């Protein structure tokens, strides 16, 4: 999912048409850039990984939030799911996230036990799969990322959702962009590690190149240059940003993409190439009519 991008588009502090944000949206999908620039706001789909991290970083416990979301009657089933993953990981400790394998049978709640819990699951986007993703992110993925970033369990670290500023020399106003920030005390300084969520391990070069140059939202700079990590939302891997776009080309690339966002063309590339992405897009309702690509989305072809 592209929750951080949609949050940036909905942030009133970010001017519609900002070159940096326009380039990011056009890279995601030209059709989405057109909808955004003509004034349509995205409606982000529910993101259980993002929601889990938000709740985890707030300082509460998983049990407290499950009760808050009305899952009181299913607490024992959720505990069983966590124990099943723990046991499966012990049995397959040579594999990363073995619970993703087809042979793992955990994460099932019978229809009879689900009865009466519709309000609860509506609090997590209305899909029962979101409950298991939410719990797995809290109990396992967050710790997988921490370990992969070489942050000790007892290092006294903090995890927070923070807005950073994406800047370029030729762009007057920065873009506020939501990230996940780990801060780890090391001696008399604080080490900062920034994580951005990815799927299938793919690091989109524009977003990560801009993040590698980001600054704090406040006046106080970081005590060290943050390390940028790609956090895989399925496997729990956390990998250093592997930059393929040279810094000297970044400003020109943003300028070119921003001009394309404003002038077109705006083909619905994701709908034509990888429609699974469209199911995670805040403009799905504008690009599709009765499950077919709309003529409005195809007008630039």
Image (cartoon, rainbow, N blue to C red):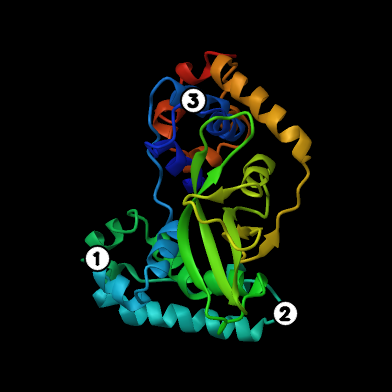
Left or right for 42, reference 112 = right
Image x and y of residue 251, in percent: 69, 31
Question: Residue at the spot x=64%, y=59% of the render?
Answer: 226
State which tag comes first along the sequence, 1 or 2: 2
> Residue 78, located in which quarter of the rendered image?
bottom left
Mark 1, other Cα within 10 Å: few <14 / some 14–19 / many ≥20: some
Q: Secondary structure at mark 3?
A: loop
Check the image and report above or below for 89 versus 11: below
Mark 2, other Cα within 10 Å: few <14 / some 14–19 / many ≥20: few
Q: Secondary structure at mark 2?
A: loop
Left or right for 118, reference 77 = left
State which tag comes first along the sequence, 1 or 3: 3
Q: Can residue 262 be seen?
A: yes
State which tag comes first along the sequence, 2 or 3: 3
Residue 94: image tag: 2
Check the image and report above or below for 102 versus 122: below
Image x and y of residue 287, in percent: 45, 27
Label 1 sits on residue: 117
The reply to whether the C-beta atoms of the residues labelled 1 and 2 are less than 8 Å apart is no
Question: Residue at the spot x=45%, y=78% of the render?
Answer: 81
Say which of 216 and 88 sits in front: 216
Say which of 17 and 87 sits in front: 17
Label 3 sits on residue: 17
Check the image and report above or below for 184 versus 225: below
């Amino acid at each position: 999912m592209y929750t951080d991008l949609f949050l940036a588009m909905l942030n009133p502090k970010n001017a519609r048409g900002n070159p940096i944000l326009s380039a990011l949206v056009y890279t995601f999908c030209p059709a989405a850039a057109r909808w955004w620039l003509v004034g349509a706001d995205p409606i982000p789909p529910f993101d259980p990984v993002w929601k889990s991290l938000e709740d985890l970083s707030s300082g509460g416990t998983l049990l407290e939030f499950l009760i808050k979301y009305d899952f009181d009657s299913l607490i024992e089933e959720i505990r069983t799911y966590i124990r099943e993953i723990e046991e499966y990981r012990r049995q397959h400790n040579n594999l990363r996230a073995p619970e993703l394998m087809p042979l793992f049978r955990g994460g099932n709640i019978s229809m009879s036990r689900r009865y009466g819990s519709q309000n609860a699951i509506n609090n997590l986007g209305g899909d029962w799969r979101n409950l298991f993703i939410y719990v797995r992110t809290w109990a396992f993925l967050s710790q997988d990322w921490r370990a992969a970033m070489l942050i000790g369990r007892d290092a006294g670290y903090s995890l927070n959702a923070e807005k950073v500023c994406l800047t370029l020399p030729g762009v007057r106003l920065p873009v506020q962009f939501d990230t996940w920030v780990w801060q780890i005390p090391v001696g008399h300084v604080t080490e900062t590690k920034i994580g951005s969520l990815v799927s299938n391990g793919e690091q989109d070069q524009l977003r990560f190149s801009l993040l590698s140059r980001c600054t704090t939202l406040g006046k106080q700079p970081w005590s060290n240059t943050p390390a940028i990590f790609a956090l895989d939302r399925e496997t729990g891997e956390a990998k250093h940003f592997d930059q393929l776009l040279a810094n000297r080309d970044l400003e020109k690339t943003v300028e070119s993409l921003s001009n394309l966002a404003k002038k077109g063309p705006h083909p619905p590339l994701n709908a034509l190439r990888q429609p699974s992405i469209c199911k995670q897009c805040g403009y799905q309702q504008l690009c599709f009519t009765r499950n077919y690509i709309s003529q409005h989305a195809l007008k630039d072809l």
